[in-house]
Amino acid sequence: MKVSLKRIDKEFLFEVTNQNGHKILLDNKSKETGEAKGVSPMELLLMGIAGCSSIDVVAILKKQKINPTLLKMKVEGFRHAEAVPSLFYQIDLVIYLEGDFSAEKAKRAAKLSFEKYCSVSKTLEPTAQINHRVIFNGEAI
């Protein structure tokens, strides 16, 4: 796995490209002037945990011949603001799933993702408490 990064302005805007040519803009959210034109590296970590877990949940359900009609996720990260480096100490995820399958299967898929499969959450686990909950067909389970 490889990525490349290129600075694209005179400030903090960077373009990161993966081996397949897919690009993401990174910027410094705390810069003193101007508006951020990309995601911050720490936001990218939160996006990574959401994406990794979502891929796991879909893969686990697909093995059971289940394809959810909806999968959304909200992620919030909490950092030690005054510390340098300012690490995440807690990450809360809410997984929204809908479909014609049991709540138990939805809950189990999410649990397996965070306890066993999600490489991003396992990477962050040593420094951050990772909490997840599932809303299935509009009900908290």
Image: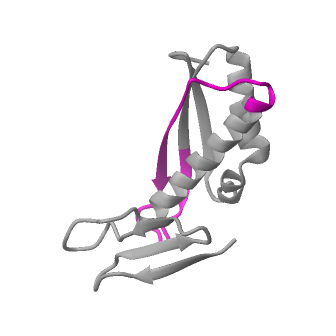
Q: Nearer the viewer, residue 98 or 32?
A: 98
Q: Nearer the viewer, residue 23 or 54?
A: 23
Residue occupying image coordinates x 66% and y 51%: 121
Residue occupying image coordinates x 40% and y 76%: 14
Name the outermost residue toward the front: 20
Q: Position of residue 22 (x, y in %)?
A: 52, 65
Magenta highlight range: 62-91
Q: Which quarter of the rendering shows the N terminus?
A: bottom right
Q: Nearer the viewer, residue 31 or 85?
A: 31
Q: Position of residue 54 (x, y in %)?
A: 62, 41
Question: From what the image shows, is residue 89 above or below residue 108?
Answer: below
Q: Position of residue 82 (x, y in %)?
A: 41, 66
* Number of dots carrying numbers: 0
Residue occupying image coordinates x 40% and y 67%: 25
Q: Is residue 69 left or right of residue 40?
A: right
- Within the magenta stretch, is there residue 77? yes
Question: From what the image shows, is residue 67 above or below residue 116?
Answer: above
Q: Quadrant of residue 55?
A: top right
Name the outermost residue toward the bottom: 10
Q: Is residue 105 left or right of residue 27?
A: right
- Within the magenta stretch, is there residue 104? no
Question: From what the image shows, is residue 135 above or below residue 82?
Answer: above
